[in-house]
Image (spheres, rainbow, N blue to C red):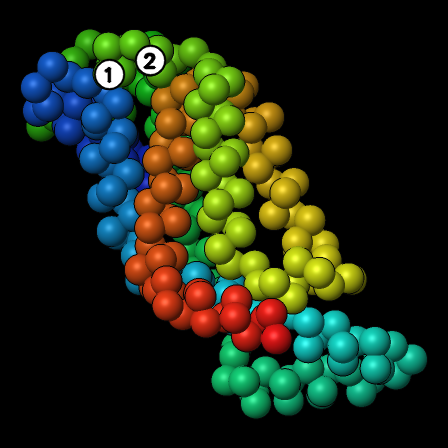
Amino acid sequence: MGIFNTIFYEPIFNLLVYIYNILPGHDLGVAIIVITVIIKLVLYIPSKKAIKSQKELATLQPEIEELKQKHKDNKDQLGPELMALYKRKGINPFSSCMPMLIQLPFLFAIYRVFFNGLTDDNAMQALYPFVDNPGVLKHIAFGFLDLAKNSWWLAVLAGAAQFWQSKMLMSKKQSNAGGMAGMGAQMTYIMPIVTIFIGSRFPAGLTFYWFFSTLLSVAQQYLVLGWRKKHEVEIVDKK
């Protein structure tokens, strides 16, 4: 954990405290918004690639299911047929995995930052010498939200945002398909429930980051995919 703390946890925690120190009123909620935007900008390129790959694979899923049904008795033929389909469509099926793997250390570090920073009295020991120690981070954000306690309504908002994000990447065909495509459609509804369940048990600071980060992801998906492109995909699916 030493290397992980040095490369990921400590820089993010110090950045959060630094932003908190320079903000008028020292509002931790505003500091979370600022650091979320910064992290999204840092991870913009890998996230952009992941979004495109996920959308392409979601659109292609019904054709993949057709091939699986066609070659259900000949598994040896299925592999080459799938690779030929990917090549024909110009899609790398593994291209969505690497960007997500790049983001995992950041996500785990952010979890520790908000969990430890709001509940651990010794968290300030991780500060760099040039970052002023505020003593403790004020838990009340925006004048009413206690970020150190759990919040069920904030968890519901995070779940709704998760559903919105997942729904954007799911095509009409995929929502009506069976097999793996159908499972993917089911996850669109299951993941928001999981988000609500987990988020309601975490400190609200982490849940608020989760919610706002998801909103930024939705905005990025619209930026990357574009409304027109999404609308055109839905029109094609209806035919």
Neighbor class of circle 2 (other Cα within 10 Å; few <14, some 14-19, many 20+) is: some
Query: As displayed, is residue 5 above or below residue 149?
Result: below
* x 51%, y 58%: residue: 169
The Cα atoms of the two marked residues, 2 and 1, are separated by: 6 Å
- The reply to whether residue 6 is visible in this rendering is no
User: CB atoms at circles 2 and 1 under 8 Å apart?
Assistant: yes
Q: The disc labelled 2 sits on which kind of residue? A: Leu
Q: Is residue 61 above or below residue 78?
A: above
Residue drawn at 69 percent across, 49 percent down = 186
How far from the left and from the top, in percent, is residue 65?
A: 74, 72
Residue 73, horizontal then vertical, whole percent: 91, 80
Depth check: give the residue in front, 138 or 195: 195
Nearer to me, 104 or 51 = 51
Q: Which mark is residue 184?
A: none
Pointer 2 residue: 145
Instruction: Judge the density around disc 1: few (<14), some (14-19), many (≥20) Cα neighbours within 10 Å.
Output: few
Name which quarter of the figure residue 205 lies in: top left
Taking 173 as reference, is 103 above or below it? above
